[in-house]
Amino acid sequence: MIDWDDVRYFLAVARGGSVRAAAERLGVNHSTVLRRIAQLEERLGAQMFEKLPSGYRLTIAGGEVMEFAEQMEASSHLLETRIFGRDQSARGLLRVTLPPFLATHLLMPDLADFARMHPDIEMEILSSGEVANLTNREADVAIRIVADRKTLPLNLHGLKGPELFSGVYMSRDRLAAWRAGAPDTIRWIVIDNHGIPDWARGAEVHTTGAPFTTPDAEAQIVAAQQGIGMTKLPCFVGDADPLLVRVPGTDLPVHGTLWLLTQGETRKTKRVRLFTDFVSRRLSAYAPLLAGLSVSGD
C-alpha cells in the first residue's frame, strides 16, 4: 500500500523543483525528503525524478504518478474539509490569512478581541502577501483585497466587505518645508516595483529625484515618515499616522474591495462562523476609515 505521506513529499519536490524547496515547504530536513522519495520509488519500482544541475525533473514514470498523486491530494483535502465542517465546537485551530497591512495597521486589535472572547480557539494568523490556497487547507479563512470580483475562484464562499481606497502621502514636516520653498529632493518611494500611478501625477508636489525603492511595506512607511518623498498607501494606514499627510491635489482611487472567503464545508464549522461574523461586523464599522473619510484635512 502506498503511504500518503510519501506522496505528499513527492508532490512537494515535483512542485518545488528541488529537495531543498520541498524540505522548506514541509518544515523537515533534507534527508527526510530524500528518504520519503526513496520509499515511494522502491514501492512503485520506478524512478520518479531525474536530478539535473537546475534541479529535479520528473521522469516519464514520475509524470504518470503526478496525475494520480494530485487526485489523491484532492480527495484528502475534500475528506478533511467535510470532517472539519462537522465540527461545531468553539475550540481548536483556526487559520486566518490576510495581507500584512491589514493585520498590523487595522485588524490586530480586533483579532485580539476575538481571541479573548474565545480562549479555546487556537489562532494562527498567516500575515503574508502570498495568496493561500483554501482548497488545500492552507488556511480556513482568507481576508483579501480584491480588485475584480470575477477573479475570485468559483469554489469559494465570500462575504463582501467595504471598499478600500488609497492615497498619496508624505511627511507632514516635509510638506511644510516644501511649501516654505525648501529645495530638497522629493523622491517617489516605490514598493513592489510599482512606480508613480497616473492618477497621482496631478499632485501639487512633484518628484524631483530618482526613485527610492524598497520591497518591505513597513520600510516604505518609515521612508515616508523620514521625509524621503511621497508614496501610495491605503487610507487607513496613511490617515492614521500622525507623521504623514495626504499630498494636495491627488484623488483617492479605489484600491479594491475587502472579502472574507471560506471554502466548501469549512464555512459550516462553528469557529469559522464565529470568526467571519465577528470580523464582518468590525470591517463594516471601519468603512469610513477604509474610504478615507476619517480626516477633514491636513
Image (cartoon, helix red, strand yellow):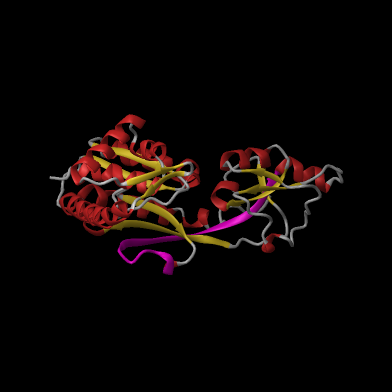
From this view, report whether residue 254 is shown above or below residue 72.
below
User: Which quarter of the figure has residue 67?
Assistant: bottom left
What percent of the width, then of the height, locates residue 28?
33, 32
What percent of the width, then of the height, locates residue 131?
42, 52
Q: Quadrant of the N terminus?
A: top left
Let me know if residue 153 is in the magenta part: yes
Q: Which of 274/130 is in front?
A: 130
Residue name at image x 43 percent, y 55 percent: 144
Residue name at image x 32 percent, y 51 percent: 141
What percent of the width, then of the height, locates residue 179?
82, 48
Magenta residues: mostly which secondary structure?
strand
What percent of the width, then of the height, locates residue 85?
18, 53
Q: Which of 240/134 is in front?
A: 134
Residue name at image x 31 percent, y 61 percent: 156
From this view, report whether residue 138 is shown above or below residue 147.
above
Magenta-drawn segment:
150-171
